[in-house]
Image: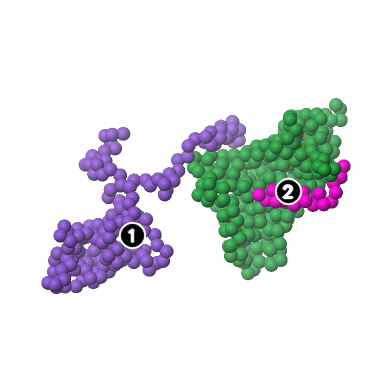
Chain colours: A purple, B green
């Protein structure tokens, strides 16, 4: 059934939209704040006294569904003590092109050594550069991304249900 | 008054370049306007306000690998985009955008070509343009292209009939087939959009179908036929088809302005400026239609063209003829 009046109303709608402000968020100038528990690039952590938390048990490698973590452990000698346990991870590599950022490695680690941080701007120009070694994972993130206020999200009753 | 040949040549060169620039920035205007109508920005990264976007697109098209299907019929496949662009550009030569001017003793007309039959020349070139789309799709030797080109051809031929008939009323009132004479007649009497409002609406709708613009763009709809007749074309060949489509749109708007809205007519002289303003209004409505209306299904399209538009155009021509003879 042809409906000319409704069609003309449609034209009015599109015409009015020209004068409304667009909704696009322009990415590099405005970065939308991430949720605090958002799963980004992995980070290996250290204790307060500088020893690494990771003991090379490779539970994370076992838990990984994409099989992208490679752990080779080595004994801690008295001269060279790297981690706080008996062994340390000599080689610890994560293949970022295979990782699905599920967070199972973080859940599997008994020492809280690996967590998923908030960094996501990790593109590279070649596939080989995407295999992150232990040094890269230990390092602080280079680029800071804005993170939303944890208080809003980490309460038992979600903040937004009480405060609109 | 006739022009010397080299004045014509220089003017043709300038106008072709201006039309190509207009086509390039027409794509920019379309993308920005469509974006704004859809509550988003158009391109705004390439240069300030995205003004270098057409140039970026041009460089991309030129640098693309120009493969062609092994089964394609070589000469026709390669020649068709050129033919499409050629007919589109050639049609623009007859559109008058200003009265003639006397510069240093030489007469410079506001048009590249003025002949007693320019209106028929326009339709003839349009028909040759249909050949380009049809043969281009067929020479690609691909099912999608063939179907797309058949649909395109059928659609364009059907609506060309209504287009020509809608213009008949204007010809009867303007007593001439030359576009320049029609504009002069409109300057003397009334813009033909008044008495010929039905003809104007039919011309506009048939024009949208002629140029394969939404809502009549089924032949090149991405979701229906991959890309219709230009599926197998890449790089600059596709660019030439795109050129042909947009320049057809600009030419058709120019013809509509000339025939119905008085061409360069307007107060305070400034012929070409009025022409540009009216042309922009037409092109804005083209883009507005693209943003608003969904696509017509093919059978709805054909039914509309033959069963609605053609009878109305015929009756319009008949009534105009009767009135012109008896008044």
- Both marks 1 and 2 on one chain: no
* Quarter of the picture holding the C terminus of chain A: top left
**Viewed as shown, does residue A125 lie left or right of B296?**
left
Residue plotted at (29% across, 66% down): A133
Where B279 sits versus A98, above or below?
above
Residue B129 percent across, percent down from the top left: 73, 53
Q: Magenta stretch: residue B318 in it?
A: no
Separation (CA) of disc 1 from disc 2: 56 Å
Where A66 sits versus B161, above or below?
below
Is residue B24 or residue A98 the one in the foreground? B24
The 10 Å Cα crowd at callout 1, few under 14, some 14 to 19, many 20 or more, is some
Is residue A58 or residue B112 the one in the foreground? B112
Is residue A137 or residue B74 the one in the foreground? A137
**Viewed as shown, does residue A96 lie left or right of A13?**
left
Q: Chain of mark 2?
A: B
Q: Chain of mark 1?
A: A
Give the residue pinned by disc 1. Answer: A100
Magenta part of the protein: which range?
B1-21
Viewer can see residue B106: yes
Residue A121 percent across, percent down from the top left: 37, 55
Viewer can see residue B302: no
Secondary structure of residue under mark 2: helix
The rendered magenta stretch, by its main secondary structure, is classed as helix
Picture disc at residue B15:
2
Where B287 sits versus B139, above or below?
above
Identify the residue at the far front of this view: B104
The 10 Å Cα crowd at callout 2, few under 14, some 14 to 19, many 20 or more, is some
Q: Magenta stretch: residue B18 in it?
A: yes
Quadrant for residue B163, please give it.
top right
Q: How many marks?
A: 2
């Amino acid at each position: 059934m042809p409906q000319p009046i409704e069609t003309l109303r449609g034209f009015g709608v599109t015409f009015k939209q020209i004068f409304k402000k667009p909704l696009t968020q322009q990415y590099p100038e405005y970065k939308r704040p991430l949720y605090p528990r958002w799963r980004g690039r992995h980070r290996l952590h250290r204790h307060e006294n500088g020893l690494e938390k990771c003991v090379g048990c490779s539970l994370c490698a076992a838990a990984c569904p994409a099989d992208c973590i490679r752990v080779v452990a080595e004994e801690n000698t008295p001269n060279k003590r790297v981690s706080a346990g008996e062994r340390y991870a000599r080689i610890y590599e994560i293949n970022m092109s295979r990782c699905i950022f599920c967070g199972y490695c973080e859940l599997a680690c008994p020492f809280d050594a690996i967590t998923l941080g908030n960094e996501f701007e990790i593109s590279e120009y070649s596939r080989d550069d995407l295999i992150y070694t232990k040094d890269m994972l230990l390092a602080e993130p280079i680029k800071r991304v804005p993170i939303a206020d944890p208080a809003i999200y980490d309460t038992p009753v979600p903040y937004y249900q009480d405060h609109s | 008054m006739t022009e010397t040949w080299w004045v014509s040549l220089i003017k043709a060169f300038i106008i072709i370049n201006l039309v190509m620039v207009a086509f390039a920035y027409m794509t920019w205007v379309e993308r920005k306007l469509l974006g704004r109508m859809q509550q988003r920005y158009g391109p705004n990264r390439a240069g300030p306000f995205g003004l270098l976007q057409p140039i970026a697109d041009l460089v991309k098209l030129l640098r693309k690998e120009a493969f062609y299907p092994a089964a394609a019929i070589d000469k026709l496949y390669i020649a068709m985009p050129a033919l499409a662009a050629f007919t589109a550009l050639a049609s623009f030569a007859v559109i008058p955008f200003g009265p003639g001017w006397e510069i240093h003793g030489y007469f410079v007309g506001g048009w590249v070509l003025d002949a007693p039959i320019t209106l028929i020349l326009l339709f003839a070139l349009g028909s040759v343009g249909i050949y380009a789309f049809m043969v281009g799709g067929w020479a690609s030797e691909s099912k999608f292209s063939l179907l797309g080109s058949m649909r395109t051809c059928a659609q364009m031929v059907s609506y060309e009939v209504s287009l020509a008939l809608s213009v008949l009323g204007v010809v009867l009132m303007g007593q001439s087939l030359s576009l320049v004479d029609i504009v002069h007649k409109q300057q003397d009497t009334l813009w033909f959009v008044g008495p010929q409002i039905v003809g104007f609406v039919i011309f506009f709708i048939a024009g949208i179908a002629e140029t394969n613009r939404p809502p009549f763009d089924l032949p090149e709809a991405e979701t229906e036929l991959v890309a219709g007749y230009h599926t197998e074309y890449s790089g600059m060949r596709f660019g030439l088809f795109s050129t042909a489509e947009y320049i057809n749109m600009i030419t058709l708007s120019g013809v509509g302005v000339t025939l119905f809205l008085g061409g360069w007519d307007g107060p305070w002289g400034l012929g070409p400026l009025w022409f540009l303003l009216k042309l922009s209004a037409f092109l804005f409505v083209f883009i507005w239609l693209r943003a608003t209306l969904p696509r017509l299904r093919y059978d709805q399209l054909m039914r509309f063209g033959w069963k609605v538009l053609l009878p109305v155009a015929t009756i319009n021509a008949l009534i105009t003829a009767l009135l012109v003879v008896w008044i």
